[in-house]
Amino acid sequence: MKNNILTLAFFFILYETLGAQQSPPFFVDQDNYLSKHDIVCLEPEMEGFNGFPVGNGDLGGMVWCNNNGIDIQINKIDLYDIPENNQMTLRAAARLKIDFGVPCYNYFYLTDYESRLSLQKAEIKMRSSTPFADTRVESFVDANSNVWIIDCEADYKGAIKEGAKTTINLGR
């Protein structure tokens, strides 16, 4: 037992002496590693539990598709109920619906789709193409403040250009 402790102590002294001059044995270039591990979907997720999570630890939520646009559930870490039985329940702050006015995520009409959650940048990018419109959505929550950025663009095609309109609904 005494021999094992001395051997272990010798190993740590040797490691500290040599390790101070070299890089750590398990150095990982996080930017390079994370940039190779985005989560990519080639079909739209139509249920909230399959959506992409995004947030900064205080403000966050889920982003998913519906036939005509996207749904976003907005959560805040300190938003909860305390009912009579004293069991706290976390509550959603709001639900945001962005409707492009045309079926831009409907499986029947999709000609191209990709959504990507970048683990390195903590952002979501979605793009789709249908006979009615090409859409692009980018979203992230600022790491240093509770600001959620949602950038949406729809390029309507053909006769739809004149009649389509994007609507935004915020509810609880």
Image (spheres, rainbow, N blue to C red):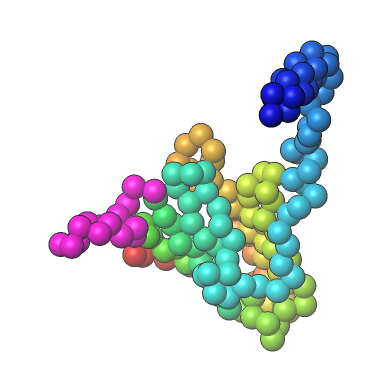
In front: 163, or 67? 67
Vertical position of residue 9 compared to residue 28: above or below:
above
Where residue 31 sits, quadrant-wise, is top right
> Would residue 170 appear left or right of 27 to someone viewing this image?
left
The one nearer the camera, 169 or 165, is 169
Q: Tell me if residue 159 can be seen.
A: no
Which quadrant of the figure has residue 25? top right
Q: Position of residue 46 (x, y in %)?
A: 58, 75
Residue 42 covered by magenta stretch: no
Does the magenta segment cover residue 85?
yes
Could you tell me residue 101's position as x and y percent?
A: 55, 74
Q: Quadrant of the N terminus?
A: top right
72 shown above or below 11: below
Task: Please provide the residue range marked out in magenta.
Answer: 77-91
Whole-percent x and y of residue 99? Answer: 52, 70
Query: 62 or 130: which is nearer to us?
Result: 62
Question: What residue sits 15% from the left and 62% below the top?
Answer: 84
For the point 42% across and 55% down, which residue is it? 75
Image side of residue 150 versus residue 25, left or right? left
Indicate whether 5 appears above or below 77. Answer: above
Note whether 163 is above or below 88 in the view shown: below
- 77 lies left or right of 98: left
Of 12 and 53, nearer the camera is: 12
Q: Residue furthest bottom?
A: 108
Total numbered labels? 0
The location of residue 63, given as percent across then percent down, is: 55, 62
Point 25% across, 59% down: residue: 87
